[in-house]
Image (cartoon, grey):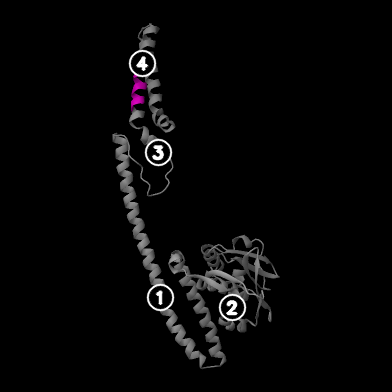
C-alpha cells in the first residue's frame, strides 16, 4: 500500500490543483453557491477514490511483490493479476534474467577453461622440473646446489598455483583419513631439508609420547603445514635458530603449533595476515612474499573444518596454531 500511495502521489497533487483552479474560475465568474460547489467536490473525490481502489485491486500483488526483497536471482516473481503494466514488467524482468544467466554461464565457462589450462600448464611444468632435479642429483658442486634451491622455489610456486586453482572444486579432491601428526611432520621436514640447510636452521618436534592422531585430508594438510613452515623459515633471519612443531591434545581436540624465533609481525598487520595478497611490513622487506600463503591456509582449514590462529610479537617470533 505504501508503494502504491507513493506512486499515486502526483495524481493526488494534480487533482487538488485542478480542483482549486476550477473552483477559482467559477468564483471569479460570479458563481456564489458553496453548497453546490461542495457537492461537486464530493462527487469528484468519490470518483477518484473509486478509480484508485480499482487500480490498487488490479495491481495489489504487483505492488506487494515490489516491496519484498528478492531471495535469490533464480527466484520467480510469481504471477500477477491481469494488468498491462505488471505483465509488461514481468516479461521484461524474465528477459533480463535470461540474458543475465546466459552471460553468467559464458563467464563461468571461460573461468573453468582458464583454470583447466592453468592446471594442465602447471602439471606440464612439473615434468621438466623433476628431470632437472634428477640430473642435479648426480652433481655436488655449489652451482648445482644453487640451481636445486631455485628448483625448490619453482616447485613451491607451481604447487601454490595448483592448489589455488583447485580451491573452488575442493570437494571433488577430498580424501579424509586418520593421520598421525608426528609422522606427517617428520615427512614434511624431510622433504624440506634443503630449505633448512640453505637457511642454516633446525627443526624440532615436540609431540606427546602416545602420538596425536587427526582426521583430515593428507594432501591439503601437507600443503598447509608446508606453507606455515616456509613462512617460519623465510622470516627467521638468525643463524642456527630453531623452528618448533608442537602437537598435543586439548579438551578432546588435537592441536598443532608451528613456532619460530623470527622477526615477528607488527600488531597493525596481524588482523590482515589472512587476507589475500596482503604482504604487510615484512612482505615489503622480504622480496619472496606473495601474500597468498596464509590466505590459502585459512581457506583450506575452513573447508577441512579446522581452526587456524596466529599470534606474534614483533622481534620475538610467531606462533601459528591449528586446532583439529
Residue found 40% across the figure and 24% down from its top = 12
Binning the other alpha carbons within 10 Å of mark 1 as few (below 14), some (14 to 19) or many (20 upward) gives few
Q: CA distance from mark 1 to mark 3?
A: 49 Å
Q: CA distance from mark 4 to mark 2?
A: 95 Å
Query: Where is mark 2, residue-wise?
Result: 183
Secondary structure found at label 4: helix
Query: Where is mark 3, residue-wise?
Result: 66
Q: Nearer the viewer, residue 118 or 81?
A: 81
Judge depth for marks 4 and 2 and give the one in front. 2
> Label 4 near label 3: C-beta < 8 Å?
no
**Residues drawn in magenta:** 44-54
Most extreme residue toward the front is 210
Sooner in the amino-acid sequence: mark 4 or mark 2:
4
Sooner in the amino-acid sequence: mark 3 or mark 4:
4
Query: Where is mark 1, residue-wise?
Result: 121
Binning the other alpha carbons within 10 Å of mark 4 as few (below 14), some (14 to 19) or many (20 upward) gives few
Residue found 47% across the figure and 87% down from its top = 132
Q: Does residue 304 appear left or right of residue 52 in this picture?
A: right
Q: Nearer the viewer, residue 227 or 28?
A: 227
> Label 3 near label 1: C-beta < 8 Å?
no
**Magenta segment includes 226:** no
Residue 84 drawn above or below residue 95: above
User: Measured from the top left, where is residue 28 in percent x and y?
Assistant: 37, 10
Query: Where is mark 4, residue-wise?
Result: 22
Q: CA distance from mark 1 to mark 2?
A: 32 Å
Sooner in the amino-acid sequence: mark 1 or mark 2:
1
Judge depth for marks 3 and 4 and give the one in front. 3
Sooner in the amino-acid sequence: mark 1 or mark 4:
4
Amino acid at each position: 500500500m505504501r508503494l502504491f500511495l507513493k506512486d499515486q502521489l502526483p495524481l493526488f497533487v494534480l487533482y487538488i490543483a485542478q480542483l482549486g483552479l476550477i473552483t477559482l474560475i467559477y468564483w471569479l465568474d460570479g458563481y456564489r453557491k458553496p453548497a453546490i460547489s461542495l457537492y461537486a467536490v464530493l462527487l469528484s473525490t468519490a470518483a477518484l477514490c473509486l478509480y484508485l481502489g480499482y487500480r490498487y485491486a488490479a495491481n495489489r500483488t504487483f505492488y506487494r511483490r515490489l516491496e519484498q526483497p528478492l531471495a535469490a536471482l533464480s527466484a520467480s516473481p510469481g504471477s500477477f493479476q491481469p494488468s498491462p503494466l505488471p505483465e509488461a514488467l514481468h516479461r521484461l524482468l524474465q528477459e533480463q534474467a535470461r540474458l543475465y544467466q546466459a552471460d553468467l554461464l559464458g563467464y563461468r565457462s571461460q573461468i573453468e577453461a582458464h583454470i583447466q589450462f592453468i592446471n594442465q600448464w602447471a602439471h606440464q611444468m612439473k615434468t621438466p622440473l623433476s628431470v632437472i632435479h634428477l640430473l642435479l642429483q648426480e652433481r655436488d658442486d655449489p652451482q648445482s646446489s644453487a640451481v636445486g634451491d631455485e628448483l625448490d622455489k619453482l616447485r613451491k610456486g607451481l604447487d601454490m598455483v595448483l592448489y589455488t586453482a583447485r580451491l573452488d572444486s575442493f570437494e571433488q579432491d577430498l580424501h579424509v583419513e586418520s593421520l598421525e601428526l608426528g609422522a606427517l611432520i617428520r615427512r614434511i621436514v624431510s622433504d624440506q631439508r634443503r630449505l633448512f640447510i640453505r637457511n642454516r636452521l633446525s627443526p624440532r618436534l615436540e609431540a606427546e609420547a602416545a602420538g596425536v592422531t587427526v582426521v583430515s585430508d593428507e594432501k591439503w594438510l601437507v600443503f598447509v603445514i608446508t606453507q606455515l613452515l616456509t613462512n617460519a623459515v623465510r622470516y627467521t633471519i638468525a643463524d642456527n635458530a630453531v623452528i618448533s612443531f608442537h602437537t598435543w591434545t586439548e579438551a578432546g581436540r588435537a592441536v598443532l603449533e608451528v613456532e619460530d624465533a623470527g622477526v615477528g609481525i607488527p600488531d597493525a598487520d596481524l588482523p590482515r595476515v589472512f587476507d589475500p595478497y596482503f604482504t604487510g611490513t615484512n612482505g615489503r622487506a622480504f622480496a619472496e612474499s606473495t601474500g597468498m600463503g596464509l590466505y590459502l591456509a585459512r581457506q583450506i582449514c575452513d573447508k577441512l573444518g579446522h581452526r587456524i590462529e596466529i599470534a606474534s610479537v614483533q622481534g620475538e617470533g610467531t606462533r601459528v596454531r591449528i586446532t583439529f
